[in-house]
Amino acid sequence: MRRKLPRRSHYASEIKPNLDGCKVALLGWAHEVRDLGGIKFILLRDVSGTCQVTIKKEDLPREVLEKVEDIGYEDVVYVEGFVKSQPKARLGVEVVLENIEILSRALRPIPYDVTGKVSAGIDTRLDHRILDLRKPENNAIFKIADTVLTAAREFFRMNNFIEVRTPRIIATATEGGAALFEVKYFDSKAYLAQSPQLYKEELVTVFERVFEIGPFFRAEESHTRRHVSEFTSVDIEAAFLDLYGVMEILENLIVHIYKKVVEEREKELELLNVKLDIPETPFPRYTYNEMVEELKTLGLELEWGEDFGTEHLRILGEKHRGYYFITHFPTKSKPFYIQPCEDNPELSESFDLMYSWLELASGGTRISNRSLLEKRLMEQGLNVKAFEHHLKVYDYGMPIHAGWGLGLDRLLMILTNRENIREVILFPRDKFRLVP
RNA sequence: GCCCCGGUAGUAUAGUCCGGUUAGUAUACGGGCCUGUCGAGCCCGGGACCCGGGUUCAAAUCCCGGCCGGGGCGCCA
């Protein structure tokens, strides 16, 4: 036998003055309860937003009144009543209660303030993440994230990319260097993938253009507001393009995402108090050398060949607001698979996408010649033999190709104006947090 | 990995320098009053000094160790 389920007639945000007189049924959570004695107000919250339910006690029979007196914060309730256009209500409308059922009772007192009357630190927020996410401004972040993901997939399909899924469990490091999480894999050792890099390069020989959106893992000791152990990367790789081609794809993607978010998430942006200006393309492009010179004029020396430190980036970020590219980094500061420039192998066909001082994406033209790739592996002190499976793909017809990886969580930080990456991840993982 | 900072009711905080009333306030919770609240209001109540050691007549306060956390750097998305 199937259970009888409660049914709603409207979502909270659909309760508008023009429904005046209509009988409605709502489902949701008691976001706030205010009892003034003879009259009581419940702010009912569902996924769409909130609406005010007004209870005039003298009009109700005893059995309804008993249920009404028992409502607490975050109880799940079913409410029947009629809509009344009401200038005295802040939203201009209310639902006058006729009947109510408490479908699920919440702990009293609830251990975390969902209404936002008392602010909480990030650690407390994450300890009570489910309750924290019930705050409208916090779940707004993830509604925007949903739009971002949908917009990205839509954009990639319009540009002939195929969505792929590469392994999260891998046998060896893909890029050397970066710390990997070790996992027990039956009787042997395996690692969690830190990037889809080598797989996506191999896949361009099949699908020409591929993209992947998924989690990757870095066992770094990082302790900052922009690093976590598990993050979401948006990766692409495309055959027959060089760095310039994929930079254009990247800036067009960013613009497409902005347009969609502005179009579809007006309410959420307002909750977050964010005003988004759609960036103009092309984004400014500067070379590594130009940036080194610029730093020099600002009195900040950098040894040529060194990557920018946070101090350098913060200074550059003060001058360069918004999105911009830095291109042609020294080859030695980049991973082995990046293509050195033909006219000057000290420089590489690489780029980073920046937003002010924050690194959002990095990419470039990849090496498509096997012997050069082997040479670069050796120069970086990596074990060529461990890459045999990857290297032999280059014997079967490897086109020129390029790609990038974009930190989705960092992009969300910018779109939602949050300053801690943990705020834009539902259940973040870092060195000090493995639960909830 | 290195460096800085912090830990007081469920939550957010005052008090800590300069040791000494009953550890204050807000919110949440319980009780009471209240028919237009939307940060509701008023009255009453219960609720806390991270753990261990030391100094002292006396420690939330000073010292040492531990645990937990926030942030910065390096590294990167």
Image: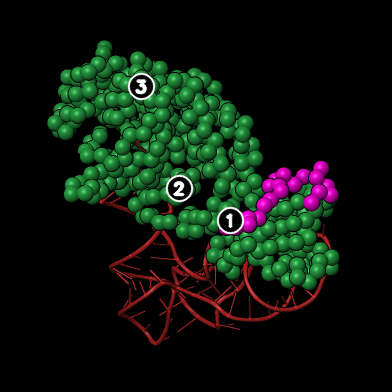
Q: Which amino acid does label 2 sit on?
A: Arg
Which chain: green? A
Q: Give the secondary structure at mark 3.
A: helix
Q: Image point 70% across, 53% down: which residue?
A: A26
Which chain: red? B
Please state the extent of the stretch shown in magenta in the rendering: A1-23
Q: Earlier in the sequence, mark 3 or mark 2?
A: 3
State the image coordinates of residue A124 (x, y, percent, origin top left): 48, 59
A102 in the magenta segment? no
Circle 3 is placed at which residue position? A207
Q: What residue type is labelled 3?
A: Phe
Q: Image point 84% across, 68% down: which residue?
A: A58
Outermost residue, front side: A1
Chain for disc number 3: A
Report which quarter residue A381 is drawn in. top left
State the image coordinates of residue A240 (x, y, percent, origin top left): 35, 15
Residue A422: image tag: 2
Chain for disc number 1: A
Q: Give the secondary structure at mark 2.
A: helix
A12 in the magenta segment? yes
Q: Is residue A349 visible?
A: no
Q: In front here: A427 or B56?
A: A427
Q: Which amino acid does label 1 sit on?
A: Arg
Q: How is the image coloured?
A: by chain
Left or right? Give the position of B50 relative to B75.
Answer: right
